[in-house]
Amino acid sequence: MTYLRDARFLLVTCGILLGFTFPMAKLANQVALPVTTWVVINSLGASIALLPLLVFSRQLRWPKGRQWRYVLIAGPLTFAGPNLLVFLVVPKVGAGYGGVMFALSPVCTLLLAHIAGLGQMNRQRYLGLLLGLSGAVGISLTRDNPSFPAEPVWLLIAALLPFVLALGNVYRTIDWPENASPELLAFWSHTLAALIYSFIALGSDHAALWQGLQSNSKLIGVQLILAGLIAPLLFRLQRFGGPVLLSQIGYVAAGTSLLVATLIMGERYPILTWLCAFMILLGVIVGVLKSATVRTAG
């Protein structure tokens, strides 16, 4: 299936799926689901989806050599870390605004990628990044949602998202083990993350934890499916698109989260915010119409 190697298809698909996770995080917070439990759900969903793929393709094996270092860092830190931040900030700043913070990661990733010597950018890609960044900044400035007073401390914490994402995007490319399967790395990264955060979650109130899981089975089921769909596509995008292109899923996620937050969550944003969202969409289109030369690891 060649489209699973097409970075543009992977970019749009991952971005749309990721955009749904912000409203889901808001719902999970509203029912008081513990943050560590939410992280476990995301990593567990990815592992469950990837396991049969690896078994049937006979690729399932233990990590070896530097693969251990990669999965220990990639899972608990570069994936679970952003999930923790999303869960914390979305109830404070809104699902739509939280999604916009993802849209700032391409600029941070571009800077780090150049420092690391990972990519060559053409003018069209720069234009796409500029349009997307302008749209994201515009949404931040035009945001007017009385349901979320946006206290400065929470805006500051939300602003950490693009930097955390950028570090993960660049690290996963720099340290990609040679000839390693994207699906295998994704499986072990998320499996280790699920195990580590499960121990943390079990260290809290056991009764409240199990009650929360049982009473919110539908919400958890939907998020497990979302996580299972995102993980294999995201690692393929990392492998075939490189860190800079990967980071642009934030643009797609920002627009998707605004739409979902408005239609489903009842959040309201002014017309200028939607015009800025259209600018983000335009930036994605311009940025991916012609591939930039980006060196990936492995």
Image: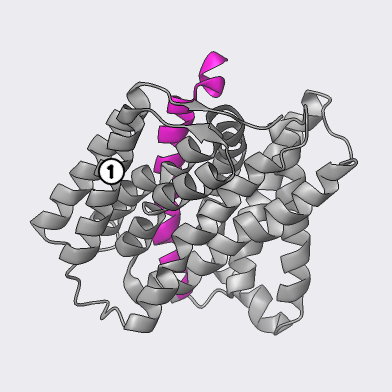
Considering depth in this image, is 250 or 38 the residue closer to the camera?
250
Residue 62 shown left or right of residue 103 in the figure: right
Residue 253 shown left or right of residue 70 in the figure: left
Q: Residue at x 35, y 32 (%)?
A: 125
Residue 259 seen from this side: no
Dominant secondary structure of the magenta stretch?
helix
Secondary structure under tag 1 reads helix
Characterize the local packing of mark 1: few (<14), some (14-19) or many (20 or more) Cα atoms within 10 angstroms: some
Instruction: Determine which quarter of the picture holds residue 13.
Output: top left
Considering depth in this image, is 169 or 62 the residue closer to the camera?
169
Q: Is residue 34 magenta?
A: no
Q: Residue at x 84, y 33 (%)?
A: 60
Q: Which residues are magenta?
A: 1-29
Quarter of the image that includes the N terminus: top right
Residue 118 seen from this side: yes
- Residue 152: x and y in percent read 33, 82
Residue 288 shown left or right of residue 25 in the figure: left
- Residue 296: x and y in percent read 61, 31
- Residue 102: x and y in percent read 41, 54
Identify residue for label 1: 130
Q: Residue at x 51, y 78 (%)?
A: 32
Q: Residue at x 57, y 27 (%)?
A: 240
Residue 94 drawn above or below residue 235: below
